[in-house]
Image (cartoon, grey):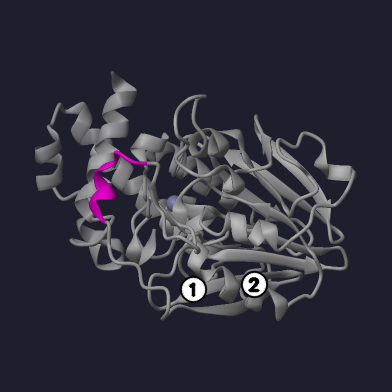
Amino acid sequence: MANTGIVRFVIFASCVVLTSFGLATGFVGAQQPQNFDNVDIKVQPAQGNVYMLVGVGGSAGGNITVQVGKEGVLVVDTQYAPLSNKILAAIRTLSSGPIRYIINTHVHGDHVGGNENIRKAGSTIAGGNVSGDIQDAAQGAQIIAHDNVLKRMSAPTGAQAPIPSPAWPTSTFVGDDKKLFFNGEGVHIMHQPAAHTDGDSLVFFRRSDVISTGDIFTTTNYPVIDLAAGGTINGIIDGLNKIIDLIIPVYGQEGGTLVIPGHGRLCDLGDVINYREMATIIRDRVQDLVKKGQTLEQVKAAKPTRDYDPLYGSTTGFWTTDMFVEAVYKTLSTRKS
Ligand SMILES: [Zn+2]
């Protein structure tokens, strides 16, 4: 998401192939020019062994979470492929160890575009956690994601896959979660059904006490609901409630669980609560109007987001306020019928 687009476009560094996927939602029109030269990758410590890599300027994609330690490096999301060299350089300021794991929070190109490059720069641990691999475990880091991420990147036999196979997850999970133990801490990957997409995962670093949320939580805009990829407003709110459940704060002082959003700045409990309140209040307003039988145009005219627009609203770009209201309306209308 962010300024350039939730971008349904993965740009593979070598040959600038634009591959659309996710598709068919209202916000796909935004095929904006991509400018990667001006993007800087900034390293920001979260806490414990966990850091946040933030793209600043140009066509920056989603935030990257990096966990480092004696066993190597674990990376959550990989941004755009043309930024891979800058991302790897940033990772190398934190650790010279092998990149062992990549976790994808969801399928969008601004979060998985660098999968192939970052995977090739890494190496899989033999034995141990590699059981269930789909691809050759000997080549590069393991890419872990919910099975729905793989389903949306790949295609039925005979059809062309939306994303070339070297970028696909190599280890997928179905059901609620997957657990790893790496660099001395438990890493809990939790699927959140039908939220931003149908393949969202939260990644909880239990010892460092940091949650990487993907695009279920962002600080930069209204929740992005990718209808075509199975997203819903109620799934977003469920995901935000899950994040809030996991957080243990230290009131009145530094400390407690920290949250790395899909886009935007490092956050704590208060930030997530405020965002959850916004999402819930707007959902309830739209729900009331849907129950009264109002049309989408009537709901838009009622401006259910008005008091939040100064913070999250937009009339331009890939995810406008209108698109958000429409997506909320559609998922609530669908639920009723
Ligand atoms: Zn996304």
Q: Residue at x 66, y 63 (%)?
A: 257
Residue sitting nearer the eye, 67 or 250: 67
Residue at the front extreme?
15
Q: Quadrant of the N terminus?
A: bottom left
Q: Which residue is mark 2?
A: 88
The answer to whether residue 114 is left or right of residue 327 is right
Residue sitting nearer the eye, 43 or 293: 43
- Relative image position of residue 246 (x, y in whole percent): 65, 51
Q: Which residue is mark 1?
A: 55
The answer to whether residue 316 is left or right of residue 208 is left
Per the rendering, the mark at residue 142 is none
The answer to whether residue 298 is left or right of residue 160 is left
- Relative image position of residue 325 (x, y in whole percent): 24, 45
**Quadrant housing residue 43:** bottom right
In this picture, which residue range is highlighted in magenta? 23-30
- Relative image position of residue 217 (x, y in whole percent): 47, 55
Residue at the top extreme?
337
Kind of residue indicated by mark 1: Gly
